Amino acid sequence: MASDLSVILPRVVIVSRRTVRKNKFVDFVGEYHLDLIVGYGAVPVIVPRVNGVHMLLDSFEPIHGVLLCEGEDIDPSLYEEASGLSPEELEEIRRLHSSDTSIDREKDTIELRLAKLCLERNIPYLGICRGSQVLNVACGGTLYQDLEKEISRKCPESQRVQHIDYDNYDGHRHVVKVVENTPLDHWFKDSLEEGKMEILVNSYHHQGVKRLAQRFVPMAFASDGLIEGFYDPDAYNPEEGKFIMGLQFHPERMRRPDSEEFDYPGCPSAYQEFVKAVIAYQKKLNSTISVPKPLKLDQEMEKQRKIIIRSFSLARNLYATGRVRHPWKESELEAGAEFLESNTALSFQQENRLKQMGATVRNAGSYIERLKLNEEKEKLARSVMGKMTVEQLSDLMSFYHMMGNICSEVLERKLSCIVSDLGS
């Protein structure tokens, strides 16, 4: 198997949905999503909806793109929007949409963490149906808890839209008006009648975007005013690996009856452009983490390297046993001390590594005091984190993962400059 990251296909993370089959839970992802991702040149990596997986998302790295699609209603407490619906109305909604109204908090946590990760790192993100709602909530937007009761009954009859039809599930369509000069406009331009800017889309949802997060721009509206698609114009350039978008409808399922032919030539474009961005993002990521070739040291630098290694070795023995087996001079510790003093921008992880190999410092006593202080800080941190919620810990882990990557990049550049200065 090739070890060069550049020849590995980009990875698109997709969270599964679960259903009950033969009295047990089964995880699944719609085949149309997988076909399109593979067909355009990426590999789907399915994250199972299993308890605790939200704490293991680092194990799915590298992540070059995230596709979130259908699923149950998002927990309303996550966007804290008062619907004004009575308990009787909420019970009626649960009865009418029983397959969607059972809240899945684990899936909510997994997908919100992935959405926030994409926003922090500018990882390409495509949200379909529920996935668009997750994106909006992750950025501070809100949702209607039921479109029929919160929008339709307030609209003139001529503007009302049926957003879900269980009797004609895949065949049901309604009109949306496409906003000019948006990606959706470019994808469906050959299918839009001049002056009308309308297409027919499928619809499988009873919830939708209420207040759109500030960073997003609408791409399409239903006749009742519901936003059917949106994107971040500042994070949209597939050729440069930028793609943040949500679509309420399912373009992958907009196909003619008893056929695999799409309703419009532009239907698969969202997936095509998304994967294009994923591929570009992978290339950009690989270029920043590529491992440099080992430097060839001249005789003087090689001699200096051996002196520093000797200094570290002496220090390790001193700290571990309090003595050194072979004769040594105190001046031999100077090389290691000078090296450390000239490179003080060390992360906690790097300091631990130096500790393990016997980090050399001038004053062993002060070094031990620093270690004790670090241990006290660690105990305090553990105490504070023990009182935090799972969601807070997840966000904290995501933040420090991002900061760790940034520190590693900056440290690598600084060390490269130091080596270059030594060689010049």
Image (cartoon, helix red, strand yellow):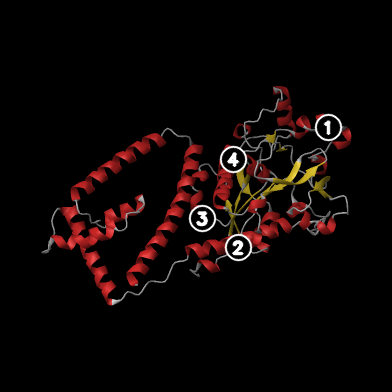
Local packing at callout 2 (Cα closer than 10 Å; few below 14, some 14-19, many 20+) is many
* Badge 2 amino acid: Ala
Q: Amino acid at mark 3?
A: Glu
**Foreground disc of the pair 3, 2:** 2
User: Whole-Å distance between the Cαs marked 4 and 3?
Assistant: 20 Å
Residue at left 60%, top 43%?
Answer: 25
Residue for badge 3: 61
In the picture of the structure, the residue carrying the numbered disc 4 is 108
* Res 372 label: none
Viewer-closest of 110 and 388: 388
- Pick whichever of labels 3 and 1 is earlier in the sequence: 3
Judge whether residue 177 can be spotted in this image: yes
Q: Which residue is mark 2?
A: 280
Residue assigned mark 1: 155
Mark before the other along the chain sequence, 4 or 1: 4
Residue 274 drawn at (x, y percent): 66, 57
**Whether label 4 touches label 3, CB < 8 Å:** no
The x and y percentages for residue 358 are 24, 56
Question: Judging from the image, what secondary structure is the residue with disc 1 in?
Answer: loop
Q: CA distance from mark 3 to mark 2?
A: 17 Å
**Gap between marks 4 and 1, in whole Å?**
31 Å
